Image (tube, rainbow, N blue to C red):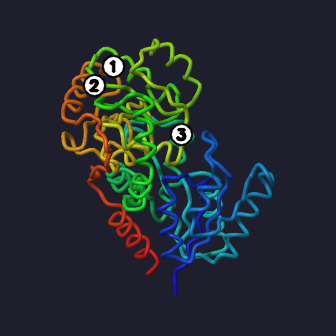
Amino acid sequence: MKKKILVFHPVIAPYRVDLFNELATHYDATICLFWRNLKNQTFDYAKIEELFVFTPHYIVKEEVGIIRWIKTLWVQLSLSAPDIVLTNEYGVPTIVALIHRMIRRKRYKIVSMVDDSYNMVAKGNHFTWKHEKAISIIAPMLDGLICVEPKVCLWYQKKYTKAIYFPIIRDDELYRDKLRKSLSISEEYISRYHLLNKKVLLFVGRLVAIKNIDFIIRCFKKARIENLYLVIVGSGPEYNELVRIADNQENIIFTGRLEGERLYAWYNIANVFTLPSLQEPFGAVTNEALVAGCKVLISQDAGSNCLVTEGVNGFVIDPVDEELYIKRLRLITNNTEKIQFPLRLRESLMQENFKECLRQLVDSLDRMIL
């Protein structure tokens, strides 16, 4: 008989679908979601739901009110009779699970998925002081913490003796099939933007100050690398300022926000992907780029720098050091080939494998409930 897992999670982004599908396959799973789309990014969520191998239960606070929402969480904990409760971070659902277990004298294990980067936990660079305080109060009471970065695991192990490593990565085989299906769109982009015999530096993400996109544009313009184009995929409040900094250079392309195959097509094209964020819990786009065969330049303050093997599939960069960034950009660009037809799916540059990481995660969870 399968063990029961109850999941409390805000919403499932595209890059987390594979993980939750695998959990729903391995366990008798009840998966409760609290939003009907990502708050900061409006995906075509109907298409995302089509990928689920489970039927989620939506418990949306804005629809029922805070009191009824908490009561519903409590009832779900009682009805599900779980062996494991998997929560997200240190918010209200985690606290409700801890109180329910204590009052009802239950024996289920409570594990939280924590997206903190090492820069956040070890250097005190948290998004809010409340988050930092919640770690010190709640982490000791949990049975496990799923961390996205090895150094964060070591930090939690040393401080609280509990941590499981699972980065935010997609199932390699499933994702590469999506990349393969988007190759025709990639060739369409190459023709539209005149990228044949060129090279592409790619950024994907929200156009907000913390992503440090103005840094990319300044470095790109100063580097003056022949035949290199900068493609910026995304939308956000910094758009107008970034366009001003780009100053109508024809080799800087703003595509707007893209998802699905329209986005994957750019990963097939790009020679180099960059994420120079000043603060980034992880950065799932790094995994997406590496699986597509892009080399990467990733901020030392982004959790996903753990996916970089220095000099092999990219470099970890200081997001304020323009001189070093330009040096790395020139080096990495020189070691890539110009875009040619016919476009082919490149070999993955990921050094870790989804299935192996998943096996280790499930083994760790199973050991808790033996």
Q: Are marks 1 and 2 in contact (CB under 8 Å)?
A: yes
Q: Nearer the viewer, residue 213 or 46?
A: 46
**Disc 1 packing (10 Å; few <14; some 14–19; many ≥20):** some
Element marked by disc 2: helix
Residue 291 position (above or below residue 42): below
Residue 325 numbered mark, or none: 2
Residue 258 numbered mark, or none: 3
Residue drawn where x is 63% and y is 52% of the image: 45
Element marked by disc 1: helix
Q: Earlier in the sequence, mark 2 or mark 3?
A: 3
Amino acid under label 2? Tyr
Amino acid under label 3? Leu
Judge depth for marks 1 and 3 and give the one in front: 3
Q: Earlier in the sequence, mark 1 or mark 3?
A: 1
Amino acid under label 1? Cys
Q: Are marks 1 and 3 in contact (CB under 8 Å)?
A: no
Residue 199 position (above or below residue 295): above
What residue occupies the far bottom of the structure in this picture? 1
Judge depth for marks 2 and 3 and give the one in front: 3
**Disc 2 packing (10 Å; few <14; some 14–19; many ≥20):** many
Residue drawn where x is 22% and y is 23% of the image: 327
For marks 2 and 3, give the CA distance: 26 Å
Number of numbered discs? 3
Q: Earlier in the sequence, mark 1 or mark 2?
A: 1
Element marked by disc 3: loop
Can you give x and y, in whole percent of width and height, for residue 101 in the image?
62, 70
Q: Nearer the viewer, residue 4 or 268?
A: 268
